Amino acid sequence: MTQPGEIMDDPLWYKDVIVYQLHVKTFFDSNGDGYGDFAGLIEKLDYIEQLGVNCIWILPFYPSPLRDDGYDIADYVSINPLYGTMQDAKNFIKEAHRRNIRVITELVINHTSDQHEWFKRAKAAPPDSNERNYYVWSDTDTKFDDARIIFIDTEASNWTWDSTAKAYYWHRFFSHQPDLNFDNPEVTNAVLDVMRFWLDIGVDGFRLDAIPYLIEREGTNCENLPETHAILKQFRAALDKDYKNKLFLAEANQWPADVIQYFGSGTDECHMAYHFPLMPRIFMALHQQTRTPIVEIMRQTPDIPESCQWAIFLRNHDELTLEMVTDEERDYMYAAYAEHPIMRCNVGIRRRLAPLLENSRPRVELANSLLFSMPGTPIVYYGDEIGMGDNVYLGDRNGVRTPMQWNGDRNGGFSRASFAQLYSPPLMDPVSGYQVINVEAQQLDKSSLLHWMRRIIRLRKQYKVFGRGTIEFIEPANRKVLAYIRRYENETVLCLANLSYSPQSADLHLEKYAGKTPVEMFGMEAFHEITEQPYVVTFAPYGFYWLLLEK
Ligand code: NOJ
C-alpha cells in the first residue's frame, strides 16, 4: 500500500509517465530577484498537476558560472543560491511526490565547470598525480584527432591550454568545461557519491548528460567506446544495489544502432534513451507531407529490451539537433525551418515548437498527437503546452529558454523584478508575446491549446498501450497518410494522421481486424465496422484519429 506522500511502487513507472521538462530559473520567481526559484516552482505545482504530466525533469540547478546554462557545474552537491536553498529543493521533491509526480534531475558526468574545485585542484597538482588525473591532459593538442567538435559555432579544438598546469586539457563541449577522466577510478567513485547524494534526497532518476564521450582512445572517434559502457555498468550496478524504482535516461545523440548499446542487456545500463533521429523526421514528414521519413526511421530502429523505453520529444532546451540526419536532409531542414541564418545554431535550429510550425494550431496538435502515440515516453518542453514562441536574437540557445508566460501582467507574471533585472527578457512580440500567449488566458478559454493538451494527456494516461505497446505500420497508397497500430494486451489502437495541408482520404487494408468497430477516443463515437473491404477514411487538413478497435 502506498502511504500519503509516498510515490507508487512500480519498477516500470517510466514507461507510463508523461514528462514535463523545465528549468527552475525559467518557471516562476517567488522572491522578485529576476530568476525563477524552487519556492516559485512549488507554487506552480498545481498548474503542472492540472496539465496531467506526472514526471518533472529539471535542468541543472547547481552552483555554476552559467556559461552553459548550468551544465557547467561548479559544485554537484549544492543549490545555486539564485534558485533557493537545499531545503527548498527538498521541499519541492516532497511536494511533487505528494502529487504522485516523479522528479528526474541531471547527472552531468562527462565534464565539470573549470570553476569546480576538482579542476582548480587538478591544475595546481603535480603532473601524473591523482588530483591532476581527475581530468584529461596532454602536452600537445593533437591527441584524439578523430574526435569531432560538437559546438562548432564556438570551439575550434577539443583541447585548451592551461597556463597553470602548463598542459592542454580535453573538453568535448565549451573550453570552460573540462572533461572528467573516467580512466581514473577515483573519478568514478567521486561521481558515484554525487549520484548517491541525490538519490538519498529522493530524486527518482537521472538524465545522464553526454554519456557517449566518457572515455577517449587514440585512433577512435572517442564515442560509444566499450570502456564507456563498462563505466555505465558500474553506475547501474551501484544504483540497483541500494535503491529501487530509479531511472537512468541516456542522452546519447547517436544513430539507433549505437543508442541501443546504452540499454545494455536491458538490466545493466540505462532504462531509457532519447530517440534523437525520430524527432527531426517528424518535422520533415510534416513539411514534405509524406510519412516516409517517419516510417523509415522507425523501421531502422531495432527492438529494445522488454524493460527499456525510448524517450521521445518534439523540442527541448537545445537547438533542434540535426546531427542524426543525412547531409541532404539537413539542407532540407534548414531550408524548410531556418531560412534565416540567425535561426541556426551549431548543427541545428534554435526555435520552439509553435513558431517552427508557423503557429498553426492544427499542425501543433498533429505533431503532439504523434508525440503522444509513437512508441516511448513523451517529454513536453515547458511552454510548448501554451504554444510559446522564441527569440532567435538572444544568442546561443537562450531564445528557447525565456520566462514562462503566466499572464498579461508585467514580465508576463513571471517575476516582480524590474525588467532589467530579469535573467532574460520575456517575449513581447505581437505574435508570441506574453500579452497574447499566456497561461491565464488559456485557462479561461476552453478551446485553447492548453485545454487541448490537458485533454490529450488525460486520454493517453488512460491506456497503457501508448507507453508499452508494439507498433505496426499500415501503408495505404496515399503517402500523405501515416497509419499505425499500437497493441498491448487487450488494447489495440489505430493511429491515423494526415500530414498534408489539404483534405485527404485513404483506403486502409484492415482485413485482419474485420468485425471490429473503431471508436474515436476523444469523443468515444463509434465509426463504421471494419470489414474485409478496404476501410475508407477521410481527413481534414492535418487531421488525426486515435481509434480504439473494439469487438
Ligand atoms: C547536453 C545539454 O543538453 C546541453 O544543453 C549542454 O550544452 C551540453 N550537454 C554540454 O553540457
Image: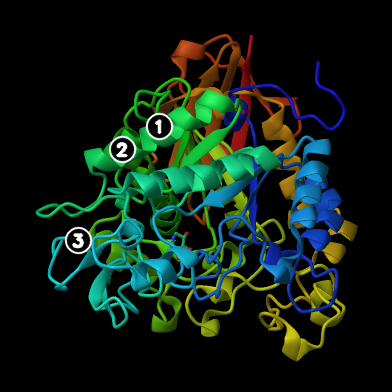
Instruction: Assign a secondary structure to mark 2.
Output: helix
Give the quadrant of residue 528.
Answer: top right
State left or right for residue 239 relative to residue 145: right
State which mark lies toward you, 3 or 2.
2
Residue at mark 3 to residue at mark 2: CA–CA distance: 18 Å
Q: Does the beta carbon at disc 1 come under 8 Å from ligand 1?
A: no
Is residue 202 depicted above or below 75 in this figure?
above
Residue at mark 1 to residue at mark 3: CA–CA distance: 24 Å
Residue that mark 2 sits on: 229
Q: Nearer the viewer, residue 104 or 320?
A: 104
Q: Nearer the viewer, residue 136 or 33?
A: 136
State left or right for residue 157 relative to residue 189: left
Count of marks, rendered view: 3
Is the residue marked by circle 1 packed among few (<14), some (14-19), or many (20+) residues within 10 Å? Answer: many
Tell me where residue 264 appears, x and y as whole percent: 34, 29
Residue type pointed to by label 2: His
Instruction: Assign a secondary structure to mark 3.
Output: loop
Which residue is drawn at the image coordinates 52% and 22% (left, top)? 469
Ligand 1: image quarter: bottom left
Question: Upstream in the sequence, badge 1 or badge 3?
Answer: 3
Badges 1 and 2: C-beta atoms under 8 Å apart? yes
Is residue 167 depicted above or below 99 in this figure?
below
Residue that mark 1 sits on: 269
Residue that mark 3 sits on: 147
Give the quadrant of residue 265.
Answer: top left
Q: Does the beta carbon at disc 2 come under 8 Å from ligand 1?
A: no
